[in-house]
Image: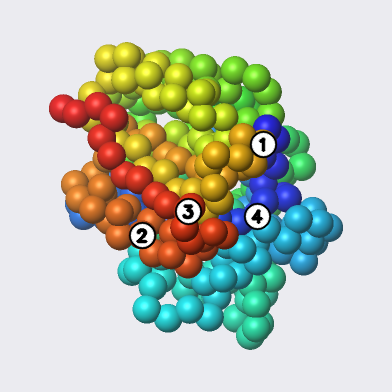
């Protein structure tokens, strides 16, 4: 599959990823010591939902659009919706027009003592990242391969932090690269928190990915999955998941609450939508 964010900005997968990212970085706030955040496939700092790409698919209408006027949401979901509401271009709008990317979501959660690195191979997107964050001394932008950055930028001097690996799945073998990249990164930084994003489309590929993760010899791997669309239609991008290594305390409970909310709110077919949070590997 080809998961270019320009076309899918604001859809269910974006909402899920950003809610989970907020929970992960929010957990880092429990201690005053600084943390490091690495985004290996950062994309653009923001996306115009009325732009050509997002307008062509209009997937945001079934994601952030459904949550725009909702009350009584799970706290983690509500916090993300509030951020989008407050984003420049949205504050007086009856619907979302601009969506912050994962890099911007992360920057909003950095404290003065924290640091972030955003990697992007597309020159235009890297240029936008530099322009967007040039005034923030806490942020570094790298126009480089994200998997290579796992070796080059880890371990960080801060000794604690989060790594998001969110590839576009444009080429065959992406699941294998995820596992290989995690092995490399974990060998360099065993106490880092790693979140690997993956699509729920090819059930056999997802099952093989999980088997390979479980066999990697890495402890404490939590998986969280959301599927608003039926999973028995093989050609459909039905949902997505995160495999999280070293998840912070109580993250599993927070994700169950958030995904229960998202499953209810974003389901295309309530009888065939769902979510799951489970431990792939224990201690």
* Element under disc 3: loop
Q: Who's the residue at 55% across and 75% down the image?
A: 68
Q: Earlier in the sequence, mark 4 or mark 1?
A: 4
Q: Judge by depth and name the residue closer to the eye, 195 or 65.
A: 65
Determine the image quadrant of residue 92.
Answer: bottom right
**Horizontal arrangement in the rendering, residue 5 relative to residue 118 (left or right):** right
Which x, y percent locates residue 262? 44, 61
**Horizontal arrangement in the rendering, residue 224 relative to residue 39 (left or right):** left
Whether residues under marks 4 and 1 lie with C-beta atoms below 8 angstroms apart, the answer is: no
Residue under label 3: 273
Whether residues under marks 4 and 2 lie with C-beta atoms below 8 angstroms apart, the answer is: no
Q: Nearer the viewer's eye, disc 4 or disc 1? A: 1
Q: Who's the residue at 63% across and 30% down the image?
A: 169
Residue under label 1: 235
Q: Earlier in the sequence, mark 3 or mark 4?
A: 4
Residue under label 2: 260
Measure how far apart labels 3 and 4 are at the Cα level.
Answer: 21 Å
Q: Is residue 135 visible?
A: no
Does residue 168 sit above or below 53 in this rendering? above
Determine the image quadrant of residue 77.
Answer: bottom left
Q: Is residue 44 visible?
A: yes
């Amino acid at each position: 599959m080809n998961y270019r964010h320009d076309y899918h900005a604001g859809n269910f997968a974006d909402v899920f990823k950003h809610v989970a990212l907020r929970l992960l970085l929010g957990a880092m706030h429990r201690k005053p010591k600084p943390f490091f955040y690495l985004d290996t496939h950062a994309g653009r700092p923001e996306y115009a939902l009325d732009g050509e790409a997002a307008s062509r698919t209009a997937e945001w209408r079934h994601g952030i659009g459904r949550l725009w006027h909702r009350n009584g949401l799970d706290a983690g979901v509500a916090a993300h919706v509030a951020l989008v509401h407050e984003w420049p271009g949205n504050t007086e709008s009856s619907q979302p027009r601009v969506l912050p990317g994962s890099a911007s979501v992360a920057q909003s959660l950095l404290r003065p003592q924290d640091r972030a690195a955003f990697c992007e191979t597309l020159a235009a997107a890297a240029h936008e990242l530099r322009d967007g964050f040039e005034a923030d001394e806490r942020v570094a932008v790298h126009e480089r391969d994200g998997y290579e950055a796992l070796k080059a930028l880890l371990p960080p001097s801060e000794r604690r932090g989060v790594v998001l690996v969110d590839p576009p799945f444009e080429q065959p073998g992406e699941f294998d690269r995820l596992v290989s990249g995690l092995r490399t990164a974990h060998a360099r930084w065993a106490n880092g928190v790693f979140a690997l994003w993956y699509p729920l489309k090819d059930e056999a590929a997802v099952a093989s990915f999980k088997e390979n993760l479980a066999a990697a010899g890495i402890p404490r791997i939590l998986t969280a999955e959301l599927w608003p669309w039926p999973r028995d239609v093989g050609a459909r991008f039905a949902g997505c998941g995160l495999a999280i290594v070293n998840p912070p305390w109580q993250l599993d409970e927070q994700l169950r609450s958030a995904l229960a909310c998202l499953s209810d709110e974003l389901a295309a077919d309530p009888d065939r939508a769902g979510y799951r949070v489970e431990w792939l590997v224990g201690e």
